[in-house]
Amino acid sequence: MSDQIEVRKANLSDVDGLFDLINYYVPDGIMLYRSKETLTANIDTFVVAVEQNRVIGCGSLSRLGTDLIEIRSLGVYPEYKSKGIGGLLVDELERAARETGVPKLMALTYATNFFQRKGFTVVEKEIFPEKVWLDCSTCAKKDRCDEIAVLKQLD
């Protein structure tokens, strides 16, 4: 990995870069659309990987209840994959999740092997009714969701 890549909390100057990265994955159904207004309002939930002032990776946390927090909007531009950036983003998100005191960290993903290497276990997504009611009910893929749920106990 380049020494020029920094992983840090996102700030308002990252909104355009976040918007571009997330929307890169929206057409393939890998990420859900997030408006610039939504990103701005939730900027404190994001971490970014930046190289030469360009957002090249991101992820965020969303609290789903008293005992569950979700990693969402996790992605890295294709040319930066397999360089350890996704792992650094998940490490930073897990650290932030632990600070909240919430005992369970989950994600919906197509990259189960990646998450398993980070200590997550594949589980049935139906065990997360909080997620289903929050996002899944409005998702275009709700009746044919092919994402896989992963879970990590933080306590």
Image (tube, grey):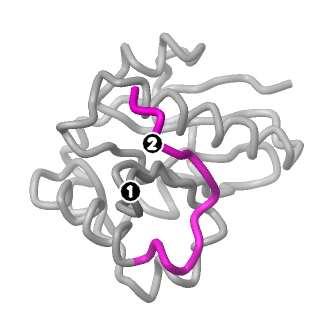
Say which of 43 and 148 sits in front.
43
Q: Would you identify the image quadrant in which residue 83 lies?
A: top left
Dots 2, 1 in contact, CB < 8 A: yes
Marks 2 and 1, how far apart at CA:
7 Å
Which quadrant of the rendered structure holds the N terminus?
A: top left
Residue 75 in the image, given as x and y percentages of width and height: 35, 45
Q: Which mark is residue 4?
A: 2
Q: Earlier in the sequence, mark 2 or mark 1?
A: 2
For mark 2, give the secondary structure: loop
Q: In the image, which residues are magenta?
A: 1-15
> Is residue 43 in the magenta section?
no
Estimate how packed mark 2 is, as few (under 14), some (14 to 19) or many (20 or more) residues with alpha carbons within 10 Å: few
Left or right side of 30 for 41:
right
Q: Would you identify the image quadrant in which residue 152 lies?
A: top right
Estimate how packed mark 1 is, as few (under 14), some (14 to 19) or many (20 or more) residues with alpha carbons within 10 Å: few
Left or right side of 97 for 21:
left
Left or right side of 89 for 93:
right
Residue 123 in the image, given as x and y percentages of width and height: 50, 21
> Looking at numbered disc 1 in the image, what kind of residue is underneath it?
Gln
Q: Which residue is mark 1?
A: 52
